[in-house]
Image: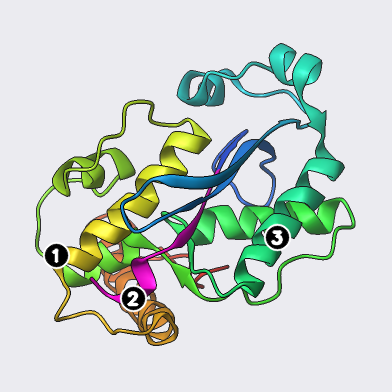
Amino acid sequence: MSNWSDTLAVFDLETTGIDVETSRIVSATVAIIDVTGEVLERVDWLLDPGIEIPAQATTVHGITTEHAAANGRVAADGVAEIVATIREHLARGLPLVAYNAPYDLTLLNRESIRYGVAPLVSPSPVVDPLVIDKALDRYRKGKRTLAVTSAFYGVPLDDAHDSGADAIAAGRVAQAIARAHLKTLPVTVGELHLLQAQWSVQQAESFQAYMRRERDPAFVAAGGWPER
């Protein structure tokens, strides 16, 4: 297996919605897994987002407005701790795994700015199993959700849309991809980070062309990796 996948920091958010500019963090997990996928360290947060959690979001992650208000941390404090924890792991040289990284990292950036927390600056190295899987297995049919991709690589995901379960599964999927594509992927995570940035541009361009051809001639795909 490539050395970069031996020890990984993993990260996931559950939120109030899908718009990174307006959605708020409800729960988060940052953990570290070893070469076997076992958890070495883990921190979980439940935040009071300060706004109503839409029913649709609650249906996904199971956290109600009432539960978050009664049991959640003050959002500004939680966001500061999440950023500090990720910053510490990156400073140690650990790759940060986030499935569909531009969603989680961009939303964390916007929350940081919202609460006056110094945001992560050009976080690196980041490992995004979604981008890598789409690049290496481009023509595989079907969805590329974390649940589907986990199943494809034989990674258990028993509690999808729990931030801890999703973060750990994403890390294990990254390790499974590293094993499956040992001869294709670069040995260093720095090289992999740069490759993913290139792949994400290609994937956005391909998606935009498809959408313009099939649905909306004016469609513009969101760009930017690992943050928008």
Q: Estimate the x, y position of residue 141 in percent, counting from the top left.
A: 10, 52
Q: Looking at the figure, which quarter contains the N terminus?
A: bottom left
- Relative to residue 59, is residue 119 drawn left or right? right
- Mark 1 and mark 3: Cα distance apart in space: 32 Å
Q: Label 3, on which residue? A: 109
Q: Residue at x 17, y 81 (%)?
A: 184
Mark drawn on residue 208: none
**Is 42 situated above or below 125?**
above
The 10 Å Cα crowd at callout 3, few under 14, some 14 to 19, many 20 or more, is: many
Q: Label 2, on which residue? A: 3
Mark drawn on residue 180: 1
Local secondary structure at mark 1: helix
Amino acid carrying mark 1 in the image: Ala
The 10 Å Cα crowd at callout 2, few under 14, some 14 to 19, many 20 or more, is: few
Q: Estimate the x, y position of residue 214 in percent, counting from the top left.
A: 22, 58
Q: Residue at x 10, y 57 (%)?
A: 140
